[in-house]
Amino acid sequence: SVYTNMFDLIQGQFPGVGVEGNKVIIRGNQTLYGTESDGALLVVDGAFVSPDEFGAISPLDVESVDVIKDGSSSIYGSRGANGVVIVETKKGK
C-alpha cells in the first residue's frame, strides 16, 4: 500500500475532501459560524472515533471508505454537520 495512514488514504480520493492536520475537511460544508472549519465525524465499524484513533488504523485493514457530505449526514445529528467519513474494516465485517 502506498498509504502510510488513514489521512493519506482519504486525501485525494474523494472530490472536495481534504485533510488539514488530523481533520478530514469536506469542502462546501459551512460550519455554523462559517470560519473555523471543523473536521468531519469519523465512524469506524459503526463507532465514533477520535482523529487519533482514526489515524492509527492501518490502511491495509480497510475494507471500504465512504464520505457523506450532503443532507444524509443529518442522521448523525449536529455531529454530522461537517460531513461523515464511514470506514468499514476487514475485522468489522
Image: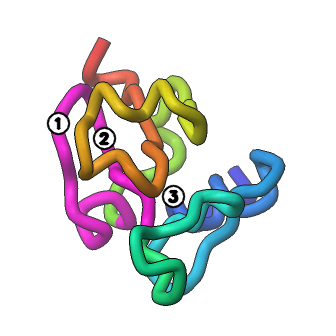
Asked if residue 67 lies in the magenta stretch, the reply is: no
Amino acid type indicated by mark 1 = Ala
Residue occupying the point 70% across, 59% down: 28
**Relative to 76, is 18 on the left or the right?**
right
Amino acid type indicated by mark 3 = Met
Amino acid type indicated by mark 2 = Val
What's the colour scheme? rainbow
Q: Residues within 10 Å of mark 1 (few under 14, many from 20)?
A: few
Q: Residues within 10 Å of mark 2 (few under 14, many from 20)?
A: some
Work out whether 22 lies above or below 49: below
Q: Position of residue 87 (x, y in %)?
A: 42, 35
Secondary structure type for disc 2: strand
Which of labels 3 and 2 is toward the front?
2
**Relative to 49, is 82 on the left or the right?**
right
Q: Position of residue 55 (x, y in %)?
A: 38, 66
Residue occupying the point 68% across, 67% down: 18
Most extreme residue toward the top is: 93
Magenta range? 39-55
Sequence-wise first label, 1 or 3: 3
Asked if residue 44 lies in the magenta stretch, the reply is: yes
- What numbered label is drawn on residue 76? none
